[in-house]
Image (cartoon, rainbow, N blue to C red):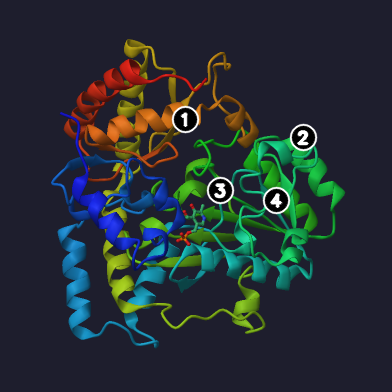
Amino acid sequence: MPYTFAKSQALFERAQRSIAAGVNSGIRKMEAPVPLYFTHGRGPRIWDVDGNEFVDFKLGQGALLFGHAPEGMAEAIAAQARLGTHWAGQSELEIAVAERVQAMIPSAELVRFNNSATEVVGAAFRLARAATGRPLILRFEGHYHGWMDEGLVGFANPADRWGDDENPARTHPSKGVIPEVLDQFVVARWNDPEHLRRRVDEFRGKIAAIIFEPALCNTCCIEPVPGLMATIRELCDRDGMMMISDETITGFRFGASCAQGFYGYKPDLTILGKAIGGGTPFAALAGTRAAMAKVLSGEVVHAGTLNGNPLCLAASRWCLDQVIAQGDRHPAGVAALGRRLMEGLEALGRTHGVPLRPQGPGLIFHTVMLKPGAAEGRVLSYRDYVRRHDAPRWAHLRRCLLEQGVSAIERGLWSVSLTHTAADIDEALARAGAAFARHAATWTAPA
Ligand SMILES: Cc1ncc(COP(=O)(O)O)c(C=O)c1O
């Protein structure tokens, strides 16, 4: 029987009387049929208040590389809580975490800690502008860099305001943004090195940095085409711009040396979030000594009461030790499980006549639902995705999956953890089989 969510529904109604719109992050309202209320998790599984058990591929928006509630991390946090939850001062623990990051990521000669990647993005932009004396940041359509004014310019340009292919618009999805912020960005299309070159040339001498998600996880999990990273590096070196790798999602998920090791490039600055804290509010800016110079000199302000919070540090040290202990098994093991799931989902699509096309490196992947008549083949850019992905049909299937106990991120992103096993994947596929059958039987395209 499909799951029902009566207790979550009741809690959501109660929540709306005290919490604005009932949720603490706008995106959580997308959960259909209702935002779920959870009681506990263990490894690759999570349970809600209705007693429903899910094989979880949402994993706290990808943060839980080490699964839910790992014993060792709970002990590390509890031991630290007994010593102190917050000092706003120094501890050997912060050096221990910084040294682990340094040892794993060649470009991370120095680090600074924050509590969210959104903050770190702001710090990186400030640093790049201070170092170069230039105003503009170049970013790519569909890439997400946090929820503040600067992180969202051109992120999800609506199709009726795309602008032409050569000159993507700088729209912002939020009201209340400082209007001049939009003028500080150049937006380019992802995965077109020649277009990027033209974009940089057009604004040559005014661009402080190029920022990107190395694999575009926030839109369709689009890996970089061969040569793209080398082009970004070449242009940054040529024009004295900083190359900022936003590894909030890919950091440590793509291996100890992150996506920059996986794809083989060396950025000036790296944004780390999610897995570095294993679900605690922890994030880091890492960079070469040269890129961090203005922090060293104190000319760039970087601050925060809770930076280097010992509870987060204790969790992070535990997480990073897990990555180190994995050695060569990571990321190959997670990638293999992810591919097993991708292949299984695609096969279910074929069996049930559902045009679902998983894409990504397995470590994380996206399920594209092709619109009727849409071309086959890998999606390569944000616009390509909007043109080909059938969002309402995916939302219907995703709800069927949830009701069978398989949880993926609402917009179609799936993450695998170090705690998933082949048996978990096969169980998820068995559950998904029932969801595909129900979807195929009940889906009707809107007129
Ligand atoms: C690539 C990327 N950058 C930045 C952020 C912002 O991270 P946070 O939500 O921790 O502020 C996210 C969040 O999902 C992200 O995916």
The numbered disc on residue 447 is none
Mark 3 vs mark 4, foreground winner is: 4
Q: Label 4 sits on what residue type?
A: Thr
The residue where tag 2 is placed is 165
The residue where tag 4 is placed is 171
Q: Label 1 sits on what residue type?
A: Pro
Estimate the x, y position of residue 113 in percent, counting from the top left: 46, 72
The residue where tag 1 is placed is 392
Residue 109 in sight: no
Count of numbered badges drawn on the protein:
4
Q: Is residue 51 above or below residue 308?
A: above
Q: Is mark 3 within 8 Å of ligand 1?
A: yes
Mark 2 vs mark 1, foreground winner is: 1
Mark 4 vs mark 2, foreground winner is: 4
Q: Label 2 sits on what residue type?
A: Asp
The residue where tag 3 is placed is 213
Mark 4, residues whose alpha carbon is within 10 Å: few (<14), some, or many (≥20)?
some
Mark 3 vs mark 2, foreground winner is: 2
Cα distance, mark 3 to mark 1?
A: 26 Å
- Please report whichever mark, 2 or 1, sits nearer to the chain's N-terminal start: 2
Q: Label 3 sits on what residue type?
A: Glu
Q: Quadrant of residue 71?
A: bottom left
Cα distance, mark 4 to mark 2?
A: 15 Å
- Please report whichever mark, 4 or 1, sits nearer to the chain's N-terminal start: 4
Q: Nearer the viewer, residue 109 or 30?
A: 30
Element type at mark 4:
loop
- Please report whichever mark, 3 or 1, sits nearer to the chain's N-terminal start: 3
Cα distance, mark 3 to mark 4?
A: 19 Å
Residue ID at (46%, 72%)? 114
Residue ID at (61%, 27%)? 387
Estimate the x, y position of residue 170 in percent, counting from the top left: 73, 50
Q: Is residue 51 left or right of residue 20?
A: left
